[in-house]
Image (cartoon, rainbow, N blue to C red):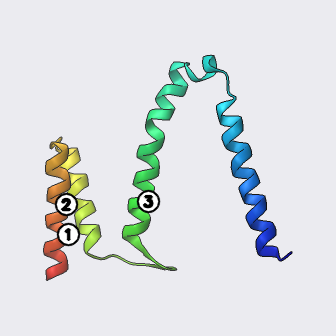
Amino acid sequence: MSKTWIALIGSSALAFALKYLGSAVPEFWLSHPRIQRINNLIPIALLSGLVIVQTMTEKTKYIIDHRAAGVGFAIAALIAKAPFPVVVVGAAITSAIVYRY
């Protein structure tokens, strides 16, 4: 058996074990207000990290391209408390304008 198969089977077993342990957590632990606040923020943190990595890197190099302008607009619009559709559409338009020129 090659190292690749060992790694694949091992990571699959680890993923299964983590999913099983996650479903075995008692409900009263998850109903704590602090845990619920943290769980509400995890998707935001993960999505923010993904956007920054996709915007500022290309393979192994750091870059700044048209997407950075869109993210900049989105940040400014969120600080100005603009509605979410305005943030998304404005960021897309800003990115497209910078990409075009």
Res 31 quadrant in image? top right
Q: How many marks?
A: 3
> Could you tell me residue 46's position as x and y percent?
47, 50
What kind of element bears circle 2?
Answer: helix
Amino acid carrying label 2: it is Ala
Q: Residue furthest right?
A: 1
- For the N terminus, give its image quadrant: bottom right
Checking the image for residue 40, the label placed there is: none
Q: Amino acid at mark 1?
A: Ser
Q: CA gap, disc 3 to disc 2?
A: 16 Å
Q: Which residue is under mark 2?
A: 91
Give the residue pinned by disc 3.
Answer: 50
Q: Are marks 3 and 2 in contact (CB under 8 Å)?
A: no
Write the residue at 16% across / 44% down: 80
Residue 23 at x, y percent in the picture: 65, 32
Task: Tell me where residue 82 appears, x and y as whole percent.
Answer: 15, 44
Nearest the eye: 8 or 61: 8
For the C terminus, the image quarter is bottom left
Quick check: 3 above or below 44?
Answer: below
Please indicate whether residue 13 sits to the left or right of residue 62 in the image: right
- For label 1, the SS is helix
- Are the residues flagged by discs 3 and 1 in contact, CB closer than 8 Å? no
Q: How much space separates mark 3 and mark 1, taking CA atoms?
A: 17 Å
Q: Secondary structure at mark 3?
A: helix
Assess disc 2: are there few (<14), some (14-19) or many (≥20) residues with their C-alpha within 10 Å of its C-alpha.
many
Q: Which residue is mark 1?
A: 95
- Which residue: 76% across, 53% down? 13
Question: Which residue occupies the foreground of this view, 37 or 4?
Answer: 4
- Indicate which disc, 3 or 2, sits on the residue closer to the N terminus: 3
Specify whether 90 is left or right of 68.
left
Query: Is the residue under label 1 in contact with that under label 2 (CB below 8 Å)?
Result: yes
